[in-house]
Image (cartoon, helix red, strand yellow):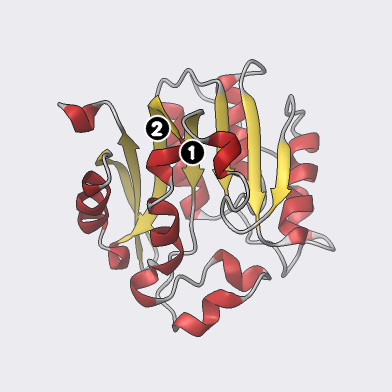
Amino acid sequence: MDYPTPSISHLSRKPYVNYVYDAAEDTFLFMDALQNDAILPLICIEVGSGSGAIISFISKILGPECYYMATDINPIAANCTIDTAKLNEMPQCEVIITDLVSGLKDRLTGNVDVILFNPPYVVTPSKEISGNGIEASWAGGENGREVMDRLFTIVPQLLSPSGLFYLVAIKENYPDEIIKTMKMVGLSGEIILSRKAGRENLFILRFDKENSLS
């Protein structure tokens, strides 16, 4: 079944233009990967939700029985996620302004069935990742990995026994190395979708706990 792309026309208007990362090829590849998977979760969280397009899209797949959460360090992006959710008649979504999942770990430990992360993956000087404006949506530091590496150590604690972690990455992030890194913390991973978009080679990675034990 094909699910409609969420309406995000408001991203071209104030206060979001130039302050919130617009949906692009990485966003749409992420949607394709989620649509291809059969997921039956109870709790779903998107880390760094930005425009809110991904969390709104997956709500069409998973329906109102799932509990949705979204986080973003950028207050304008958090408000944009709320507006996108409302525009697309999302059943409900708790949106939290925070760095990754700061302050939520105790509440969510072992309970999250789906974690979604389209991280800042562009290779940049480390000093560029310290902001909380739109630069926080793309500046990834050394190898584009400095932000995502911080979340990797937390994901195994958050996921439920059958939970899934979905990640967007590019070639410069060394996806195969990411899979090996996550294996060391108890998660089995694979590349489930890839696409060339301009100069970028985009990948969607999926991780779980169950296969890591086999």
Residue 25 seen in the current view: yes
Cα distance between the residues tagged 1 and 2 = 6 Å
* Residue 179 falls left or right of residue 195: left
Element under disc 2: strand
Give x and y (percent) for residue 73. 66, 60
At 27% from the left and 26% from the top, the residue drawn is: 210
At 22% from the left and 28% from the top, the residue drawn is: 211
Give x and y (percent) for residue 166. 41, 41
Q: Do the CB atoms of the residues marked 1 and 2 lie less than 8 Å apart?
A: yes
In this view, 7 is above or below 15: above
Element under disc 1: strand
Say which mark, if any, is on residue 61: none
Give x and y (percent) for residue 167. 40, 47
Mark 2 Cα-neighbour bin, 10 Å: few <14, some 14–19, many ≥20? many
Q: Earlier in the sequence, mark 1 or mark 2?
A: 1
Residue that badge 2 annotates: 164
Tell which of 150 and 87 is nearer to you.
150
Residue that badge 1 annotates: 115
Tell which of 32 and 119 is nearer to you.
119
Tell which of 95 and 23 is nearer to you.
95
In this view, 91 is above or below 133: above
> To which quarter of the image does residue 63 belong?
top right
Give, as a three-letter code, the residue at label 2: Leu
> To which quarter of the image does residue 64 belong?
top right
At 48% from the left and 57% from the top, the residue drawn is: 119
Give, as a three-letter code, the residue at label 1: Ile
* Residue 131 falls left or right of residue 39: right
In this view, 52 is above or below 3: below
At 79% from the left and 37% from the top, the residue drawn is: 87
Give x and y (percent) for residue 128. 53, 81
